[in-house]
Amino acid sequence: MTDAASLADRVRAGELRLHELESHADADTAAEARRRLVEEYSGASLDSVGNYGFPAEAAESAIENMVGAIQVPMGVAGPVTIDGGAVSDETYLPLATTEGALLASVNRGCSVINSAGGATARVLKSGMTRAPVFRVADVAEAEALVSWTRDNFAALKAAAEETTSHGELLDVTPYVVGNSVYLRFRYDTKDAMGMNMVTIATEAVCGVVEDETTASLVALSGNLCTDKKPAAINAVEGRGRSVTADVCIPRKVVEERLHTTPEAVAELNTRKNLVGSAKAASLGFNAHVANVVAAMFLATGQDEAQVVEGANAITTAEVQDGDLYVSVSLASLEVGTVGGGTKLPTQAEGLDILGVRGGGDPAGSNADALAEAIAVGSLAGELSLLSALASRNLSSAHAELGR
Ligand SMILES: CC(C)(COP(=O)([O-])OP(=O)([O-])OC[C@H]1O[C@@H](n2cnc3c(N)ncnc32)[C@H](O)[C@@H]1OP(=O)([O-])[O-])[C@@H](O)C(=O)NCCC(=O)NCCSC(=O)C[C@@](C)(O)CC(=O)[O-]
Ligand SMILES: NC(=O)C1=CN([C@@H]2O[C@H](COP(=O)(O)OP(=O)(O)OC[C@H]3O[C@@H](n4cnc5c(N)ncnc54)[C@H](OP(=O)(O)O)[C@@H]3O)[C@@H](O)[C@H]2O)C=CC1
């Protein structure tokens, strides 16, 4: 059996490349050999990075050139009561973060939501998109391709669904810019976030398009998907799950637990989250939905780069019969409970806290439940932060808890 020292020697001698070590030793030994080399090269000590709590083999399809793991502390907020389409339960919310005061804030929001009997959440639209870009000769050919795509949707759907036993092609929306044609394919990916699934399926679809038309594929992703970039198309059309949560908090609870009034929160929400965001030309009309999305993404093994779309949310607040109504609508929350980072042991335990590890019954219900839980966590965070701003204790809270 090769040990880490001799593996490192072989890399130094130029016999092996850094990314080839798993072919010559188990994954933990390979990671140890890389740490030795990186420590030697950089002068850094990687003792903490090397002190990880799962077999390196478990991370095989999640990372290359592994040297260890970064540990982010995880806490829980709640339990919070959720009346959802896929989850109807009281549940703790797992959040991993390094921002002191965040868990306290979401926890306060959850307890206030419970005082109102719980929050309601629903997934209102679902579909993962991939939009390849094709080159055509001119606008006449572009129009012909668009018509052909509409007329031959059944053939495209059949080609896509040959590549997956779970995914379903739902529709295609064409966009034309001169002699470039973008076909935005939308799939039901059930419990998978689905980017690998839809990329593989769309490649098969593109093969049919190229065989049957004059169009030539330029790229499997033409950026109208839109993955991992801020984009209005996701805010308007949705991507992944479009999910909304709301709650009406009794005035007494707002005054006693949040130290403010429904009127103050409603005014603050309008001037900050709506008018302030509009003036800033922001895509996020909210206070800190990204905080909860990022923390719950890390805790449950989601693709952290998709926090970009996850934070595409609008928060509303209004006074209803003297009480405080608050809602959060996340237009493009891309989540899965199978595949990707959800398989890692600690992240799978995060999913277990919510009771959504793996495939749901029916398929897709676990990912819906995860989306609803993240929406309610976001609602809790919005309620607490808006109230902290209204009662002017944001900086004191962070000074106390976050430094
Ligand atoms: C910090 C609080 C909650 C204090 O709020 P409080 O009402 O003074 O605290 P409290 O001691 O009376 O406790 C109330 C409840 O808060 C929770 N709580 C309280 N302390 C803890 C704790 N240590 N650990 C866990 N939970 C805690 C807990 O639920 C507790 O109830 P209890 O269980 O005791 O009956 C409040 O001031 C607050 O929420 N502040 C806002 C902090 C926040 O939301 N920070 C988010 C990050 S800000 C940011 O990143 C984005 C920003 C601001 O730049 C975006 C923008 O532009 O808007
Ligand atoms: N390729 C790309 O362009 C991009 C990839 N990514 C990465 O893609 C990964 C996520 O892709 P994703 O496709 O979700 O994951 P995986 O590639 O891990 O695939 C998930 C697979 O799980 C199978 N499956 C089993 N049970 C279910 C169920 N209940 N519901 C749905 N599928 C089920 C499906 O197989 P089957 O299809 O055979 O039915 C599905 O394709 C992440 O690692 C992410 O970082 C992110 C962005 C872009």
Image (tube, grey):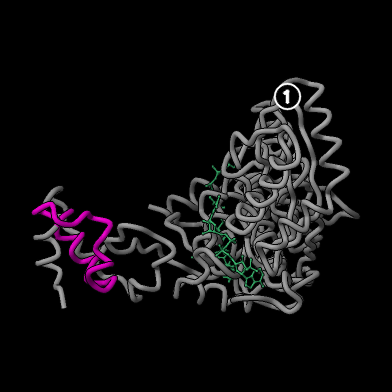
The boundaries of the magenta stretch are 11-38
Residue 226 image position (x, y, % from top left): 64, 41
Q: Quadrant of residue 194?
A: bottom right
- Is residue 15 inside the magenta stretch? yes
Q: Classify 145 as above or below 107.
A: above
Q: How many marks?
A: 1
Left or right placement of residue 5 versus residue 314 in this view: left
Please determine whether, in this image, residue 141 is positioned above or below residue 160: above
Residue drawn at x 33%, y 63% is 69
Question: Picture coordinates of residue 254 (x, y %)?
Answer: 73, 58
Splitting the image into 4 quarters, where does residue 61 fall? bottom left
Q: Amino acid at mark 1?
A: Val
Q: Which residue in the structure is indicated by mark 1?
A: 177
- Identity of the residue drawn at 49% across and 70% down: 347
| Residue 259 in view in this figure | no
Where is residue 96? Give x, y as percent. Answer: 48, 63
Question: Residue 137 or 246: which is nearer the viewer?
Answer: 137
Mark 1 C-beta to ligand 2 under 8 Å: no
